[in-house]
Image (cartoon, rainbow, N blue to C red):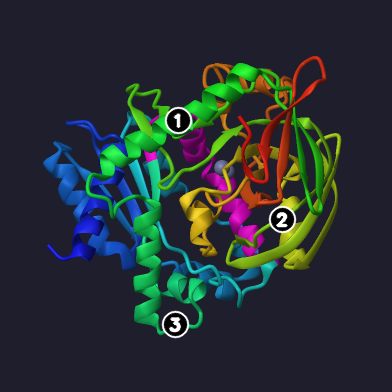
Amino acid sequence: MPTFQKNLENLATLALRLGVNLQPGQRLVLIGPVEAVDLLRRIARQAYELGSPHVHVELLDEQMGLIRALHAHDDTLDTVDEERTAMLKAKLERGDAYVRVSGSDPDLMAPADPARVARITKAASVANRPVGDLVQRAHMPWTILAYATPAWARKAFPDLPEAEAVAKLWDAIFAATRADQEDPVAAWEAHLAQLQRANDHLNARGYTALHLKAPGTDLRLGLADTHVWESGGSAALVNGARFVANMPTEEVFTAPHARRVDGVISSSKPLSYQGRLIDRFQLTFRDGEVVGVTAEQGQAALEKLLEIDEGARRLGEVALVPHQSPISQGGLLFYNTLFDENAACHVALGRAYETTMKDGTQRPLEDLQADGFNQSYTHVDFMFGSEALDVDGERPDGTLEPVMRGGAWAF
Ligand code: ZN
Ligand code: ZN
């Protein structure tokens, strides 16, 4: 088999064996862009070979989203597809595994009015809440991985001819997901064990806050009471199977305290949000809430994001990624959060993950919120990490310990 075909086959294997850890008899929901049909077919075939009784496939053409944003009548933008949400919810509630392939054009929505895009996005995220809940609570195993679409490759390598750009992006995806290794599953097991070591250290130290310092960043980021650090794999509630939600994943992450974040934080990489680029921006926090925002590019889109709801102005995730991670060392800006967030330390505006709270998937939401868990309809990551980042952990008695120095683990 030629190398490219072999790597693509490996990616399908990783999605099923590590990503969702598909079990014989378990159904699969498989959603991805039309451009990715060759990968989707491989995943479907391997799923049947592993004993899945049925694979539900949705091929998406993202141009349809742009067409709607440009041409739908203004008074129809809040209309949502309730029937599709109900169908997905029923499948996932049953415990079907869920594989999502992404490959969006980062500039897709550039021709559309951001206010119209924001309305469509908000209506969809409210309507999709039942599905989002199942995902966030790790009800069933799910994973997201990427496919090098031409539109995305052109954005990542603007100076190359399209075919070359696509080939380069594939090389970067295969390297980041370890799909190009001789035994990709074994390579992942070794990687997950390393993440676990950092994860265990952070949980053992019991920090109440992190202090982030870098050029343009000076933030005291309180951690939620009863937060837990998480990395790599999670256990699905429905069958207890360990799944890996993001391929690649390099992060160790937890829940900030929604009401205890103070200071300023500056982005270290552009954020591609709803088809728009937001770049070189700074957020000022007081008592957990964003009270000031400046962006050299995409300020309007950033303000729209902050206006989605009350929780969109607060943090729901802080993730530590060593600057030495393979994705970071590659130096490529992917314009895709799945990759870029694994290149650098990041925080997310919006909803926190229940899995980053002690017994979080079993406790009532109000209980979690009392401990500082942030609730929102959105969750958008942005990067603040660099080789100039220092992180200290604050112990319950107020003493500080080094966690990262110059973007590398300090323990
Ligand atoms: Zn993250
Ligand atoms: Zn995130």
**Magenta extent:** 115-142
Callout 2 amino acid: Ser
Quadrant of the drawing holding the C terminus: top right
Callout 1 amino acid: Ala
Crowding at dot 1, Cα within 10 Å, few <14 / some 14-19 / many 20+, comes out as: many
Q: Residue at x 76, y 44 (%)?
A: 313
Please tell me whether mark 2 sits on a helix, a strand or a loop. loop
What residue sits right under mark 1 in the picture?
Answer: 138
Crowding at dot 2, Cα within 10 Å, few <14 / some 14-19 / many 20+, comes out as: many
As measured in the structure, the alpha-carbon distance from the residue carrying label 2 to the one carrying label 1 is 29 Å
Q: At which x and y percent is residue 272?
A: 60, 62
Please tell me whether mark 1 sits on a helix, a strand or a loop. loop
Q: Residue at x 44, y 35 (%)?
A: 232
Callout 3 touching callout 1 (CB < 8 Å) = no
Please tell me whether mark 3 sits on a helix, a strand or a loop. loop
Callout 3 amino acid: Leu
Is 20 on the left-hand or right-hand side of 130?
left
Q: Residue at x 19, y 43 (%)?
A: 47
Is 15 on the left-hand or right-hand side of 245?
left
What residue sits right under mark 3 in the picture?
Answer: 160
Judge whether residue 410 can be spotted in this image: yes
Callout 2 touching callout 1 (CB < 8 Å) = no
Quadrant of ligand 2: it is: top right
As measured in the structure, the alpha-carbon distance from the residue carrying label 3 to the one carrying label 1 is 40 Å
Q: Check residue 81 in the rendering and tell me which mark sits there, or answer none.
A: none
As measured in the structure, the alpha-carbon distance from the residue carrying label 3 to the one carrying label 2 is 27 Å
Quadrant of the drawing holding the N terminus: bottom left
Q: Residue at x 35, y 21 (%)?
A: 240
Q: Check residue 267 in the rendering and tell me which mark sits there, or answer none.
A: 2
Which callout, 2 or 1, points to the residue nearer the camera? Answer: 2
